[in-house]
Amino acid sequence: MLGPKATRIIIRALIHLIAITAAFIWILPYMGVFMASIRPLKEIIKGWWNFEEFNPTLENFIEAWNHPTVPLSKGMVNSLIVAVPATFIPLLVGALAAYAFSRFEFPVKDLLFLTIVLLMALPPQAIGIPLFSLMVRLGLVDKFPGLILFHSANALPWIILFLRNYLETVPKDFEDVARVDGASEMQIFIKVVLPIMGPALLSILALQFTWVWNDFFFALILIYSPEKYLISQRVPFMKGEYHVPWGLLCAGSVIMTSVPVLLYVILQKYFIRGIVGGTIRG
């Protein structure tokens, strides 16, 4: 009969085996896309895992980056113009709102918070036409500020919910000390609360940036000038009318996904801490 220590070792090994297997299954399609992007079509026609011939090249990446009609270099700049402010604006506004919901009492607080949560249930396809009509009236169609404004507003419900729940796990001791020392509520928020919310804010930064960066549906509704296309809009237009350059499309997809993947790698430690929640003990 196995002892407690041996049982824990076996359980831990099984958990690691399951996690590694799941990770491999998830990364397998990406490996296929990457191999198709660096190898000629004739080499992968029988499967990207066939290595009878292996002559890697960056030709597809260079062509995608400098494409004659939809260069990804320009698309990446356009996406950054939208994604950066559409990440930091709701992050700041959501942090302020979450602090208010977590620390203050005011009329219809619960009803307002319930409304914010319910807004998360709206499917994106249901607001496409009303969104376009609203942006037409505001004169923000085919303009980056319109897309930035939408993504900022669209992110606020889940950001407020996320941060409010995070703050509920954090003791108020430090805030009370700062309040006794004469600090104003804004000073407490900036100097005490924001540093405490650091891991959660960085988690939201990674999630929101990735959502905005990968968005295709709303970009297609609001941006239609070819020179303003975001990177997510440009990759599909690399497909020819009579020919599908799979290597080129795969290279474009790798370039597009490389930015959020790099962001997740950089913020991985903080991302996990933010998802788990507060670790401060009173």
Image: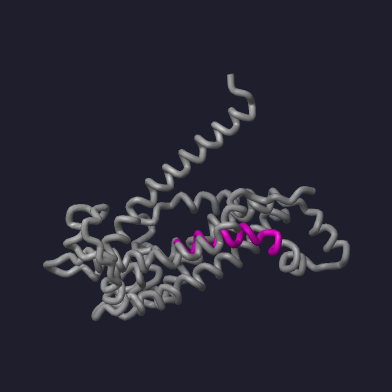
Residue at the extreme front: 52
Q: Is residue 225 visible?
A: no
Residue 267, given in percent of the width and then of the height, sits at: 56, 62
What's the coloring here? one colour
38, 174: nearer the viewer: 38
Residue 2, given in percent of the width and then of the height, sits at: 59, 22
* First to last magenta residue range: 194-210
138, 217: nearer the viewer: 217
Which residue lies at the image location 58% right of the left edge and 18% below the top edge?
Answer: 1
Quadrant of the rendered image containing residue 93:
bottom right
Left-right relation of 116 to 66: right
Which residue lies at the image location 20% right of the left edge and 60% below the top edge?
Answer: 43
Residue 34, given in percent of the width and then of the height, sits at: 32, 61
In the image, residue 196 lies in the stretch drawn in magenta:
yes
Prevalent SS, magenta region: helix
100, 282: nearer the viewer: 282
The answer to whether 81 is drawn above or below residue 34 in the figure is below
Q: Is residue 248 visible?
A: yes
Residue at the extreme left: 242
